[in-house]
Image (cartoon, helix red, strand yellow):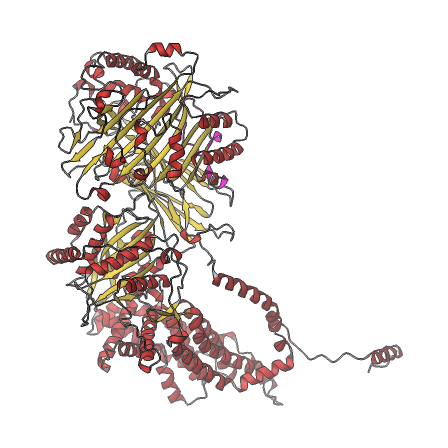
Amino acid sequence: MAAHRCSRPVWLFILCSLSVFVIAGSHDTTVTHEQRAGVVDDPQTAAETAGQTAEQTAAEERQWEATEVREATPDDAAAEKQDTPAPETVVLQSFPQPKDDFQEELVVRPLHSGDIYASFQFRTQWETDFMRGNKVSHYRLFPKSLGQVISKFSVRELHISFTQGYWRTMQWGQPFLPSPPGAELWVWFQDSVTDVDATWKELTNVLSGIFCASLNFIDSTNTVQPSASFKPLGTGNVTDHRFLRYATLPREIVCTENLTPWKKLLPCGSKTGLAVLLKSEKLFHSSFHSQAVHIRPVCQDWQCKTTSWELRQTLNVVFDLHNSGQGKREWSLFKMFSRTLTEACPLASSSKIYIDITDNPEGEQFELSPATSLLSQAVVLGDRRTFSVYDLTQPATFGSVRSLNLLIRWKSNEGHMLRPLLHAERYVAGYGLQTGEIHTLMYNYHPYRSFPVLLLDTVPWYLRLYIHTLTVTSKGKDNQPSYIHYQPSKDRVRPHLLEMLVQLPPNSVTEVTVQFERALLKWTEYTPDPNHGFYVGSSVISALVPSIVAMDTNNTRERPLFSSFFPCKEESSYFVRVYTEPLLVNLPTPDFSMPYNVICLTCTVVAVGYGSLYNLLTRSFQIEEPSPGLAKRIANVIRKMRGVPPL
Amino acid sequence: MGLLSDPNRRRALINLLTRLNAPICVVCYIAGVTWFMGLAFEPFTLRTYMSENAMGSTMVEERFPSGERAVATGREFAAHKKKVGGMPVEWLVKTMQARGMEVYTQRFSRTLPFPDEDKERYLVKGTNVYGILRAPRAPRTEALVLSAPCTPGDNNNQAVGLLLGLAQYFRNQVYWAKDIIFLVNEHDLIGMQAWLEGYHHTNTTGMDWSPLQGRGGSIQAALTLELSSDVVTSLDLVLEGLNGQLPNLDLANLFYAFCQKIGVLCTIQGKLQRNDWDSVSGYSHAVQTMMLMVMKQASGRPWGDHGLFLRYHIEAATIKGINSFRQYKTDTTTIGRLLEGMYRKLNNLLERLHQSYFFYLMPSLSHFVSIGYYMPAFGLLAVILLLRALDLWVQLAAPPPRTEDGVADVEQQSSPGPLSVLTPLVISHLTGVALYMLPIQFQEMAVAQFPVSETEAVVLTAIAVYTSGLALPHNTNRLLSGEGTEQGWRVLKLVALLYLAVLLGCTALINFSLGFILALTLVPAAAFVTPHVPKFLSAFILVVLSPAFTLLFSVFFFQELQEMPVSFLDGWLLYLSVISQGILDHFLYGSLVYPLIALLVYPCWLLFWNILFWK
């Protein structure tokens, strides 16, 4: 949570920021520690001071790294510039050139389950304007394919993620960047776009080509316009959700063919820098794999007069210790990625590796080698974390062997993970193929504080929700949502959209149930494997969760007394998004095999035979007199004229 | 149709059918029974084959190495079980966690409607423990289940040991695409019922269970393991589930294929298959195997813990280890490899098992009779009812013999009021309702009045209600305005025949074995009964052919088939316990046989009883 003393609306978006380090401004830096007495009012000042300090002490041995501010928010661009090694003169020389900048970093966090979590982030920033008819043709660091997409489709923000696997919140804690299994795409368009649906359709097809994924299967039946759950993360406070489109493909399988185009968007490709670690044979030999691309406009300076475009490419992967560890609990870069690092990407202004050592302050949990003296603190997802930092731009990092192979050797098995405060799961209840019930469980593990969450549910039309059966209960009592946005489905046109703002009482489970009926599809609408079932995408839970740091009231950490009476506002809650597991629902499926044909055939026969059988049952049959011959009929006519009874 | 729309030919046909009605019925009956017996003759049956492509062509390797360790784990489990005196929940949770699984527990409790004397339980409280092995990079949408019941005494420890051994081995493999749930359930079927209801959040039987914390999506297939010795001679496959439901035949094929591959003796109904189908003994062996399956299926009860999965459209089977006096023994490693192979193939499934048959009978593990082959046997029996109904219809529709003075009388007779049919229908069904409700309702009163236990009270009340229903015809006659007319019983019998035909037809579609066994006894009774046959003999025959006696014969026949003949007294006691078990199955697991018999079949039979005593 970075929005602190300043209360400009821009900061509110940072609240929703998915950035790796959401940092409490200057609070954690040495500078602040030292200068606590003269309370820093403006973060900018702090940032600058921090930057100066960093420059002054760059060559010296440092205890605390002072660069977090740069990570904090896009708005700290000024601070960041000072922090970058590029000399100011260069910037001045290339002034007519649009300024661009590339940063790369890797965060490694040993998890308590014994798994290891590695998160790559690559950020490219470019001061340019794709809009207003500007024809941008010279690209340096920013990938041209995406730049063209932005300008052609008037994209304001684009977020796309491909995930294979499900993030196990209860074992792994919260991820830096949450994403649902399968593919997820959400886009804010500029308000100049007139036909949003057509643009969206075209955009998904283009992205499908760029990322080699089945995004072309996104159509109106799985696209929704959430009214509250997905707000823009960049500048601009447009909240007209007509310009927002959100779609997920829970069935999408992510593999190397999606990774390769993703890697090609990097300025250094996978040749040098951190990207050399991205070898698909190792990345897909893991418990969880997620890659994403986020494009958004960010402020260029603190006054936010001009905006620049930020492209963030992230890749998260969780390696399973159990599978390949064979009892020996040891991890190294080489073991994880079958590569070691030899240099930073030459185009990168910053290239760093962070290892989360919060649970290991005295080195009793695991041993880290080579050791680094550079430390960094940050409040990540409401928790104060400590990291060891390896700066790849410094040749000293690679040591005498000219190669960096980080090694973590566990010493003890114990370890207690702080339970995530928010957790959700979902399942289908009931049996049979006619009806069912979707249960969504939301757990609030906070001991004494309740908080609101926004639940977004997108259900395909072939599950017909009985919205009157919607119940929200917590602790056995009815829980009235304070906001409900429901858009009913239209068969074969659009899905159900249900958004609710629910207050989760402290230490409770809130259960949302809704019954549905399974529709019988037309026989051409079934997938080639109808007996596999049909997917329902994850529901999305967005929440401002009270921070663990703010929970810490019994002064376990040494803090000045005057600073700790009121819970710090800026740390009191943080934004988190939790995705539930997708659902696999069986629909009534005809047996598309030989008996099915037999049934069709017999039904036809029965239908034909029905008429005659019906005749037999309803009519009475009598033997008819044979019709009289011509002569007789003439005779009868004559007799009738004569008034004599006929023959 | 042309044949029937021509009145002359139609009349001729109807004449033929009415004149030859009795012989045709007899021929149909004999043909039906013969057809059924022919089903076990090997040349008439089909060889089993794997229909599911995902399981057929893909070869898997079985490498499970640690059978010895599994046996040791089983011993450890036994020791802890003995120490705790029940399910060692804590030990299981710790052991499963050590194997790298997500472990959850579920508590449940159930008060039985009356004490179960077979298993000596009334107030059941227990805990299920299950661990979920999460498949890497799978989004928790599909799961497979391997379960082993924790039974009291020394039974089934090896099954739990092997389950834990497999869990450890599976954990270190990378190829899983579906989550695998390892479940140890207490109190066998009750625990399983609680777990399944918790997993699917339904409550069909009024059980108390704590909600489940972890799930793995929709369960694709399940296997239940029963293993009580370190080595086994053969593995037995149990398929029959609740209400006679069977898993997809591909599951049986999978088991058979792996037994062949690994070289384990495998049986079904505890019977090995024989190659000498052309000899009399070989044929009678096949008949025995098939009849055992028919009897088990007809009972409608789950014959293993797998039986309850089938309600949720989860293909499931029980694999039982049998240790007999054969020389050749199979060790736990081999069984582990067999299960590993089966799970790897199930893991390869892209869709639910649906390619093969759901309705079949198995005269041996390698041969099966599909629904298309066995249905004609039932059809031949059912057609008798329709023929008799046609006969009656023609008799009713035919103009009554003309008498000069009796025109008005005939008018009156030919239109018996609906009341005359309705009254016996209503009364017999009320008797059925009494048979369904009273035994449970009156058990306390019966226990207070008579020196019997609750279970006995229930069973004896049921028998008493059943017998007192036989006194019904007199009541009906008294309720009717006057003496029953000739036309009256014909209408009643017509209704009863059609009723029975529909009833048996529907039953046979869902549970062929039950429908067929009921048809075997009820159809002759329904066909011959009129008020004009000798009363005493007919009444005796009718009683002998009633559902209760069918059950009694089935009990003796089943014992005979299992080569465990019982004396009459033992048989009677067994019969009583079977009735109580049937009622319990209904209340505990939702088996439908008891309500079917009580609410529909028995009233229908009472109608025929009513016809016999029409005058």
Against A595, is A453 above or below? above
Instruction: Read off the magenta span.
Output: A219-244
Against B369, is A459 above or below? above
Q: Nearer the viewer, residue B489 or B160?
A: B160
Report x, y in % for residue A309: 41, 22
Against A176, is A516 above or below? below
Q: Which residue is painted at 54% across and 84% down in the image?
A: B18
Q: Which quadrant: the N terminus of chain B?
A: bottom right
Q: Residue furthest front?
A: A401
Q: Nearer the viewer, residue B13 or A291?
A: A291
Report x, y in % for residue B345: 32, 55
Q: Nearer the viewer, residue B510 or A31?
A: A31
Classify residue A249 as left or right of residue A353: right
Report x, y in % for residue A120: 31, 30
Q: Which residue is painted at 17% across and 35% down in the image?
A: A409
Classify residue B443 as left or right of residue A637: left
Q: Nearer the viewer, residue A169 or B106?
A: A169
Report x, y in % for residue B312: 35, 57
The answer to whether residue A240 is magenta is yes
**How many callouts does the rendering have?**
0
Asked if one can make out residue B491 in the rendered structure from this viewpoint, the answer is no
Predominant secondary structure, magenta span:
loop
Q: Which quadrant: the C terminus of chain B?
A: bottom left
Q: Which residue is painted at 30% across and 17% down in the image?
A: A5
Asked if one can make out residue A232 in the rendered structure from this viewpoint, the answer is yes
The answer to whether residue B501 is magenta is no
